[in-house]
Amino acid sequence: MLDKVLNAKSVAIIGASKNKTKRGYQAIKTLLSDGFEGEIYPVNPKEDKILGLTCYKDVLDIKGPVDLALITTPARTIPEILERCGQKKVAGAVIIAGGFRELGEKGKALEQAVIETAKKNGIRFIGPNTSGMINLKTNMNLVGIKNAPLGNIALLCQSGNMALTLITEATIRKHEGFSYYVGVGNESDIKFHEYLEFFRNDPDTKVILMYVEGMSEGRKFLQEAYKTSIKKPIVLLKSGRSATGKKSAGSHTGSLAGKSEVAKAAYERGGIIVIENSDELFPVAETLSSQPPVKNNAIAILADGGGHATIAADLLSDYKINIPQLSDKTQEKLRAILPEAAAVSNPIDVAGGTDSDPSLFADCVKIIIQDPNIGGILVVGLFGGYGIRFEKSLAIGEEAAAHRFGAMIKKRKKPIIVHSLYSSHESRALDLLRHYDIPVNDSLDISCKCVASLCRYGNYLKLYHAKTNFIFNWRNKAKEEGNLIIANARKKGRRVLLEHEAKKLIKLHGANTSVGHVAKTEDEAWAIAKEINTNIVLKIISPDILHKSDAKGVKLNLRSEKEIRKGFREIIKNALSYKPQADIRGVLVAPMAQKGLEIIIGTKTDELFGPVIMYGLGGIMVEIMKDVTFWVLPVSPNSCKKMIEETRSSVLLNGVRGQSGYDKKSLRKLISICSELIESYPEIEEMDLNPVLLYEQGMDVVDARIILKE
Amino acid sequence: MLDKVLNAKSVAIIGASKNKTKRGYQAIKTLLSDGFEGEIYPVNPKEDKILGLTCYKDVLDIKGPVDLALITTPARTIPEILERCGQKKVAGAVIIAGGFRELGEKGKALEQAVIETAKKNGIRFIGPNTSGMINLKTNMNLVGIKNAPLGNIALLCQSGNMALTLITEATIRKHEGFSYYVGVGNESDIKFHEYLEFFRNDPDTKVILMYVEGMSEGRKFLQEAYKTSIKKPIVLLKSGRSATGKKSAGSHTGSLAGKSEVAKAAYERGGIIVIENSDELFPVAETLSSQPPVKNNAIAILADGGGHATIAADLLSDYKINIPQLSDKTQEKLRAILPEAAAVSNPIDVAGGTDSDPSLFADCVKIIIQDPNIGGILVVGLFGGYGIRFEKSLAIGEEAAAHRFGAMIKKRKKPIIVHSLYSSHESRALDLLRHYDIPVNDSLDISCKCVASLCRYGNYLKLYHAKTNFIFNWRNKAKEEGNLIIANARKKGRRVLLEHEAKKLIKLHGANTSVGHVAKTEDEAWAIAKEINTNIVLKIISPDILHKSDAKGVKLNLRSEKEIRKGFREIIKNALSYKPQADIRGVLVAPMAQKGLEIIIGTKTDELFGPVIMYGLGGIMVEIMKDVTFWVLPVSPNSCKKMIEETRSSVLLNGVRGQSGYDKKSLRKLISICSELIESYPEIEEMDLNPVLLYEQGMDVVDARIILKE
């Protein structure tokens, strides 16, 4: 569908100009100088010729078909232009102008008009408010960034400067380039997920590189990302972390989540390699575009000095990558060619062995790459610089080694990544490595991050489940009684389910929880307590009181009639003094839960990704330690397992220091139930089970809160 | 003292050679080509002239005085050479050869011989096993690294390759260079802390840059570091993090600590800027050498594009740096010169305002730098590249701006840091910035780290306490009874104080703890319990059982005679089945502590830094969440406060969610007591108070373990 846009064979420049400072001039100049393979049609009612090309008064005057219109005129002119493009049957447009929804209400209306006009006329468009688009394969450069290198990385970017940064970096690194660049702009028509689908099917794109500030359809994006990342890696940097978490959420879960944690978790669930440092963005994409993933998370470090070897070992360990001992056989072979002082376990330090002949590097790599324990090799140090640093003639040995590296990378399905201090110097050996598609970095930190991303992608491919699709079967498992609970609250104009209602709902789907009964009077409270006949908890029930503890609306561990009656009275009094206007429905009388491990499970509706779930250690710890994990719903039983394992506190569940463990099966089931609840009742905005007490056997949902959508 | 070594006016090359591949040739060649200002004396019994210089048969044949000997001969020859150097009254030596303690026992003996010979002859030496030393001020280049730039950073390095890396980086960055480079090697004679003292007093050194793998005298180093960092910043990368934590420590504290956490904490306590990523090492040093520290932790970001501004804001937020709104006045002034679409709060986005005249950057900086809320400015984006990217003529405006930046940096005591995508391109404007000592980085991540280090150093200078000195007044506050407890254990050949002994010791110094009494029989146990007359805890007492719980040697909450007697019997039985040969002294009978917040305090003797203390949340959480902090002992009352505030769990102490807080004063006092105990009894190797229960009022040390030195 996007083919005619991104692979357009003819481009009309609407707003073409003879003024050299205008975009409408620069665009034509760039298309000509870059050698665009298709037709170029300048359009401007006032000109006859621009840069030697016939200029058309109107798009309708153009004889041949027009695939794409590059529109460089101001915002207000766009709807009219799109109308005329529609008449001409133009398939797509790139709208450069800013001045739409980013300027507020008025701009928003104009943007809506643009969207509707385009839709009516069957035009798909990129932007508005974009730096443009480049198809590097056909030299359709609609941006004006000069000398962007051709290659197999598709770049999707929400900042012109970041695109410029990444393209400049590619130029400096002299290795990999781009198949496409798209500045998505306001994403008013063509959305991130559509570009993803296009690039997934583009045979010339091996990696998709993204800089994202926001997104309009997160869930669809996830669905496409998941389908894509099994075929080709997506590398993404999400910015705007710090501007988040400012919503004053009414729920504990919400206030913890912030949006950026959710986004990171969601993207990772979609198989995306999420990058936090902008320096790493391009090198990681380059590495993934050229090297096979690491299958066993195990790397050998080959160094010509102790310092670099140590730092690399530290960094790879930080990334939880194994640096296994080489096999005895491998060590023996290395010992045979290296000096006595060499370290041949892993990291391997040649200890001067390459000083007189750096081609020995290739001998070492050849031996190491055959070791079955090793999934990839990171070469660190001065390779490529021996000819520069020590003696010109040594460059020959380095070049010989580079050629052999190239032969090895073709034969074996194991990656080689090279760190070289001389990466930015003129080095024939390093240029040869690049020619053989072996990445070279001058930063040790970034080299290790690149290795880590190959390991991560390798792990991901192993864990991939074709069934995951981020799609809900809405209401599929809803129960009549559940629907009634929600309908009843709705009818009464409430968005908050009362505690006993929420508990009934989750119990209905199989969760263990003591619902208890609501007492309207002291007498009723005592009657219910007598019936329960164990220690009692009393809790205020009011749609106006979300945080019962804050209102001193909870009393624990009561037993005698006197305690129950006094407790009831105090709770009512406290609630009224906390919120005099509160609509108090009574006091919930329920059996005290036994002590157990406090955990918390919450769901919320993320504005970007829709329903997500949070799980973690509960109580005060959740706020202090933030040992929680977020997953996009729905979740499979297998995901529930991984979710629990992901938290640092998961070791607690297995039992530590002689303590017995906890019922992980029940916990997994409860998470599944939450997923089912959200799927069954799309009315639910958020849900907060806090605390849930987990026992050696079984669990108990002690408090539950459910908020409905408006 | 090191003056004659590091500022030598005459150098003898012992092992001078005509063979071009030999160090003894290269060293002379380098000294000549670099233009060493002092005398060069080649020494080799077989040569008459080398590279045009008179060659001496023996160091004693040299007529003039010899400050320094560069010794390039093999390890075994060194002692004899040092003897002859001693006769010649040579003040210092640089010993290049490896083959000493790094090769094991034999090498160790040879190293010892070298140390002793040098000492006897009054020679101070660098190395052995070093790449050498450079004094860039006098061109005394004893390493052979070419073209190292002169500047004000002193480089102390434990890896030749890392030195080469840092020097190469300096060359590429074309801004700051080095006053000295010293490869410390095995640190057999001159130690890190002595170099530090020297560089502190060197007027040409503004920053000390260190790459450290290990160190022989950590405590002395800290003392010197503390004195130094108030005068000039020390920037340090410690590698070898992952190889640590492998000691199977007998104490919980020890096993958590590992060495690297201790080292990081210790260095930071010494005022050192500790760097984790090697990429950041040089840029941070460069920034600190050229820019004033930020006094108020508040930065303005000036950008010419949204992407860079957002990423920078994210990163600075990660570093907990404020990005405050500009004052109304400042915003007004900016609005007057920038386009309507510009963001003028902070980050400031010029929104195309600089497109036609980049000199506007200087106007913006001038306005912003006067804002009293702002402590420094980070300029991010394309500055310096307008002439490259857009139109050659724009370079003039950039250059004009650069000159004005230079004038402003001289006038105001606020730093300017520039990120430019074009940092590695030829840009006159960026060269001008470097000339005016304004750092330029092509990495946004590193720019932010540089800003963060200026903030960190600014904060440090404010918090500095002249009293801190890392020096103990050993035994000053020891008590007779305490000495007796330790002497008694020693006499019996024990390294472990029994629980009641340890508790007595800490109680003696003012800690609240229930010592209890040791019962040898069931009857005794019941008698003691009756006396205590509250709920009882029983614990096994045996020097052979360190972890009582593992041996099932603890019973809680007993009250009745039956319970006490049964408990006693079971504990004895469990202990014997856990360790049949255990020397069982009886069962400690003590009152049960009330419930409280579990915390843990431990001390250990770090092999590098000596006594250190750990504090954190106790119980199972300490192992899972690792929310602990390490400090070097002794600690001041003020340090105790900061220590507690440093942990994430400190908010718990203040009371969260309606819970009352805990007695922080008692906690601080307990930490002080631990410091006093270590200072009073140097026999203590480690101490483990776990758990300590903290209450709203007061605290209780529930279990205490003290291990003495061997």
Image (cartoon, coloured by chain):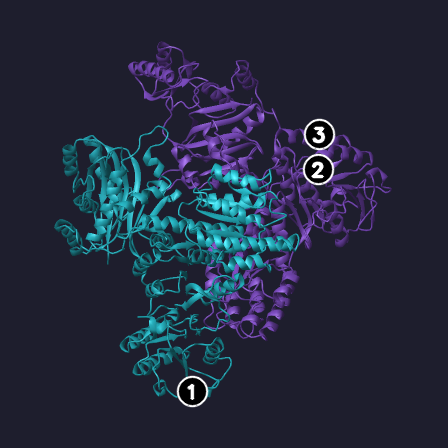
Chain colours: A cyan, B purple
Q: How many C-alpha atoms fall within 10 Å of the one at disc 2: few (<14), some, or many (≥20)?
A: few
Q: Position of residue A111 (x, y in %)?
A: 34, 73
Q: How many C-alpha atoms fall within 10 Å of the one at disc 3: few (<14), some, or many (≥20)?
A: some
**Residue located farthest toward the right when viewing the structure as drawn:** B63
Q: Tell me the quarter of the image containing the C terminus of chain A.
A: bottom left
Residue type beneath disc 3: Ala
Query: Do pointers 3 and 2 mark residues of a single chain?
Result: yes
Residue type beneath disc 2: Pro
The residue tagged with tag 2: helix, strand or loop? loop
Residue type beneath disc 1: Cys
Mark 3 or 2: in front is: 2
Asked whether the beta carbons under mark 2 and mark 1 sit within 8 Å of each other, the answer is no
Is A105 on the left-hand or right-hand side of B460?
left
A490 and B106: which one is in front?
A: B106
Q: Chain of mark 3?
A: B
Mark 2 or 1: in front is: 2
Q: Chain of mark 2?
A: B
A563 and B576: which one is in front?
A: B576
For mark 2, what is the residue? B74
**Residue located farthest toward the left when viewing the structure as drawn:** A480
The disc label shown at residue A55, or none:
1
Q: Position of residue A352 (x, y in %)?
A: 61, 44
For mark 3, what is the residue? B113
